[in-house]
Image (tube, grey):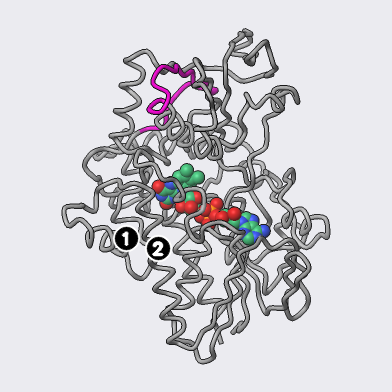
């Protein structure tokens, strides 16, 4: 058992692990150092939004923090409003309230169990793993612990290639959409036309929020395929009963082209529709990903990722309806294309796009980059990650999907998948493990990881 543990990160993953640990009675008391990065503890980017328009994209019944208490979030929400159903998509703000309430409860419970938590409202700057412990450094202070867990979430977004320094300096190219939403009141005059680069769930949040606050503004959203994420159905559909045959067939031939063929076949045969097939693969995704050789993973990233994410990370139906209304009113247009460059032009910016070999030019007052979670540790200004990489304490996933780690979350120093070098006492949870697990960013996966990690940390 590790008695002194540092949890580094101030979001839902850290909060979930902390709560899992404090809930348990262990033979020896625990001492936890929780480095929250200075933000309001537990909410992170996803649940820090104050907007009622920003909904969970998972139904309330599936959003518990605890693998062992599946109704956790639903019970919490129903205490305020008994009319809430498990199939509802609730505001993410409410989920942030739940995270905070659970952390407060866990801190009390931990005290009763004799555990002790030191909340350090700063970012950890550096980490030095040694044979039998880890030194965690923030500012001038260093603390020695038996084990450390990185729960850093996604890394700060970076500008896409092709964006000029002048466009970035002008403030008319926004790299961090969350900061813009928080600071949008700082815009003296709403822009007339806005380009949103990317068409995933972040783009959806941005479009809904800004179109409400800037009622005269028109929006053009651009992605390679010009398609929005698919929507959930109003009524919940159960995952397909028996995906065992499909999973076995996929395991037998770990080849992306073959997998796509199998999926197409399965979705045409399955009566309950493609959503049921996609959802039924969720518990198997880490095992399937582990079967794929690196060149097949690279092929998936090049050819199938966008299509998979559209069907896998779906939006609530009421959000789809709101976007349809924006399109109908002529305020939102979707276009296909790849951004080649963005530069300043007069008071605005000009974008050069390429679509099927044809170049197009587009002028805008403001461009917002919404290209999904950044987990590429190879090109990040994140101080702790840079330090760990520079000192070769960790190694990057070759496809830019986080860090090398094993399926238990132990970080690897270097080496290949065949001959990895593990740290026995340095772990990660959440987005940094995408290279190992693929699906590793949402609560249903994070709570499983937290439970498993708590088992490992407390194992005799
Ligand atoms: C907009 C959005 C909506 C989402 N909606 C859903 C949803 O509906 N359902 C779902 O299941 N999932 C959803 N997700 C997925 C989401 O990523 C997870 O649910 C969860 O929020 C991830 O939490 P996290 O702690 O891993 O990351 P984060 O919430 O990003 O938290 C990481 C924290 O670590 C801090 N940190 C970074 N570096 C350091 C350091 N060196 N020292 C200390 N602290 C540090 C950061 O400041 C941050 O507070 C959504 C994600 C986003 C971005």
* Residue 385 image position (x, y, % from top left): 72, 55
Is 293 on the left-hand or right-hand side of 30? right
Q: Is residue 73 magenta?
A: no
Q: Quadrant of the N terminus?
A: bottom right
Q: Is residue 380 above or below residue 452?
A: above
Whether residue 290 is visible:
no
For residue 182, the mark is none
> Are discs 1 and 2 less than 8 Å apart at CB?
yes
Q: Residue furthest bottom?
A: 27
Q: What span is in magenta?
A: 211-230
Q: Which mark is residue 73?
A: 1
User: Residue 72, image x and y in percent?
Assistant: 31, 65
Q: Which quarter of the figure has residue 407? A: bottom right
Vertical side of 427 occupied by 298: above or below = above
Label 1 crowd bin: few (<14), some (14–19), many (20+), radius 10 Å: many
The relative height of residue 248 versus residue 158 in the rendered view (above or below) is below
- What x and y, as percent, mark residue 155? 63, 47
Categorize mark 2 by other alpha carbons within 10 Å: few (<14), some (14-19), many (20+): many
Return the residue at label 2: 65
Q: Residue furthest front?
A: 188
Is residue 148 shown above or below 374?
below
C-alpha distance separating marks 1 and 2: 7 Å
| Left-right relation of 298 to 46 | right
Pick whichever, 306 or 105, lies toward us: 105
Residue at image coords 61%, 33%: 302
Query: Does the magenta-highlighted stretch encompass residue 222?
Result: yes
User: Which residue is rendered at x = 69% and y = 16% of the image?
Assistant: 344
Secondary structure beneath disc 1? helix
* Disc 2, SS: loop
> Dividing the image into 4 quarters, which one contains the C terminus?
bottom right
């Amino acid at each position: 058992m590790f008695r002194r543990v540092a949890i580094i990160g101030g979001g839902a993953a850290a909060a979930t692990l902390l709560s899992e640990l404090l809930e348990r009675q262990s033979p020896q008391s625990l001492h936890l150092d929780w480095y929250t990065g200075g933000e309001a503890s537990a909410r992170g980017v996803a649940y820090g939004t104050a907007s009622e328009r920003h909904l969970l994209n998972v139904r309330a019944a599936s959003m518990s923090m605890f693998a062992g208490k599946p109704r956790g979030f639903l019970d919490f929400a129903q205490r305020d409003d008994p009319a809430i159903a498990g199939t509802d998509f609730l505001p993410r703000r409410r989920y942030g309230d739940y995270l905070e309430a659970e952390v407060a409860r866990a801190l009390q419970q931990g005290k009763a169990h004799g555990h002790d938590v030191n909340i350090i409202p700063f970012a950890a700057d550096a980490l030095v793993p040694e044979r039998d412990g880890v030194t965690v450094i923030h500012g001038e202070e260093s603390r020695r612990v038996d084990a450390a867990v990185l729960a850093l979430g996604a890394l700060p977004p970076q500008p896409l290639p092709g964006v000029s320094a002048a466009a970035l300096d002008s403030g008319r190219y926004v790299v961090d959409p969350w900061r813009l939403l928080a600071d949008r009141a700082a815009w003296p005059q709403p822009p007339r036309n806005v380009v949103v680069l990317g068409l995933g769930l972040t783009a959806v949040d941005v479009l809904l929020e800004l179109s409400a606050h800037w009622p005269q503004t028109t929006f053009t959203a651009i992605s390679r395929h010009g398609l929005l994420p698919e929507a959930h159905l109003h009524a919940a559909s159960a995952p397909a009963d028996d995906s065992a045959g499909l999973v076995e067939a996929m395991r037998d031939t770990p080849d992306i082209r073959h997998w796509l063929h199998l999926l197409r076949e399965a979705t045409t045969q399955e009566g309950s529709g493609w959503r049921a097939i996609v959802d039924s693969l969720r518990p198997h995704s880490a095992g399937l990903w582990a079967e794929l050789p690196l060149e097949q993973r690279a092929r998936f990233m090049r050819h199938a990722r966008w299509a998979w994410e559209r069907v896998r990370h779906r939006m609530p139906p009421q959000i789809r309806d709101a976007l349809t209304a924006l399109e109908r009113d002529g305020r939102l247009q979707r276009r296909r294309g790849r951004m080649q460059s963005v530069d300043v032009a007069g008071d605005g910016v000009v974008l050069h796009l390429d679509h099927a070999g044809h170049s197009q030019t587009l002028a805008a007052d403001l461009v917002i980059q919404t290209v999904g979670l950044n987990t590429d540790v190879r090109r990040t200004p994140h101080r702790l990650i840079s330090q760990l990489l520079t000192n070769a304490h960790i190694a990057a996933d070759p496809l830019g999907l986080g860090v090398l780690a094993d399926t238990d979350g132990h970080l690897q120093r270097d080496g290949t998948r065949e001959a990895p070098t593990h740290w026995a006492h340095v772990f990660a949870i959440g987005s940094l493990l995408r290279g190992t697990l693929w699906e590793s960013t949402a609560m249903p996966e994070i709570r499983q990881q937290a439970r498993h990690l708590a088992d490992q940390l407390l194992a005799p």
